[in-house]
Image (cartoon, rainbow, N blue to C red):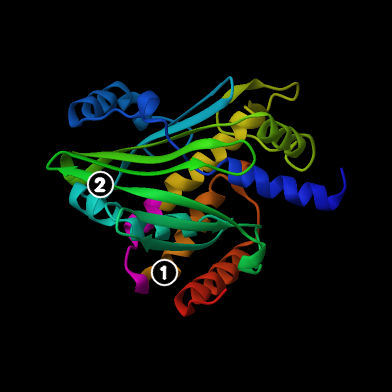
Amino acid sequence: MNHATIRRTVLWVWLLLLPALALAQTQLGSAAAMQAKHASVKGQLEKNVFGRPLVLESTEASGQLSGNIFAVVAYPFDQVSAALGKPSGWCEVLMLHLNTKHCAVRETDSAKTVAVAVGRKFDQPLSEAQKVDFVWQPATVSPDYFSARLSADKGPLSTRDYRIELEATPLDGGKTFIHLGYSYAYGTAARIAMQGYLATIGSDKVGFTATGTNASGEQDYVGGVRGVVERNTMRYYLAIDAYLGAPDAKQLPGRLATWFDSTERYARQLHEVERNDYLSMKRNEYKRMESGGS
């Protein structure tokens, strides 16, 4: 596989792993269900390898991948629902990811769309990025339950049924229990692209689920497509947490720094670029968005 093919494969793999959710499979759907889930994972939230109240789950089935994060965030429920109950907030979340080059909210008479451009892990023209449009479904908000969803029926290659879903319910002490879930369906072309990535530059990448120890007594972690899903699940959770802590536009420098520093806590899984390179790239991308340039 030549370098150009590898570069294209990496981009396709990123596109394949845009967060998505199949509601029938992962949505809890109510405050009562969220509170019950919180009770069932309380022990895991209090003691885990992440060093924060978080539970990460992933599954791989025929033609489908999914991931879920259940976590306690140190922000009041009203703040969570206000920040993530509008599509512009999701643009701010998505922009923290290395591969998101541009994000804009488009509005027609019938729907609002979150238009995302994705590309490589360095500065590049938008003409070289790929576009994915997510339809925004108005958020559900009640005194004890919040949910927001984005969806894209079609993706690149043979992918389909993308969904982004966040649910939240208030906890005592001004905290909030959240559920971030995603899944997507894929076909033969997407499977081939994934196999190419995992056989080349993605061959040494791992996720977070422990699978035992190796001959040297070191911890082994899940690899392959589940590893990819888990890494992206964590990146998006950390983006949500960073945005909730600094939602104002004037707080952007701190938000960017927080996201990067948070990913470096899990460098074995998440390290891709150096801190200054990330911050410089994102500053340039935000300037491009603000100016309306390409």
**Crowd around label 2: few <14 · some 14–19 · many ≥20 (10 Å):** some
Secondary structure found at label 2: strand
Circle on res. 252: 1
- The residue at the point 23 percent across, 50 percent down is 81
> Mark 2 — residue?
139
Is 223 in front, or is 85?
85
Count of labels in the image: 2
Q: Is residue 246 magenta?
A: yes
Q: x, y (%) of residue 126?
A: 61, 67
Sequence-wise, the earlier of marks 2 and 1 is: 2
As drawn, is 159 to the left or to the right of 239? Answer: right
Q: Is residue 16 magenta?
A: no
Q: x, y (%) of residue 266?
A: 56, 44
- The residue at the point 18 percent across, 47 percent down is 174
Nearer to us of marks 2 and 1 is 2
As drawn, is 263 to the left or to the right of 129? Answer: left
- The residue at the point 78 percent across, 34 percent down is 199
Secondary structure found at label 1: helix
As drawn, is 28 to the left or to the right of 52? Answer: left
Quarter of the rendering occupied by the C terminus: bottom right
Q: x, y (%) of residue 276?
A: 61, 68
- The extreme front residue here reads 109
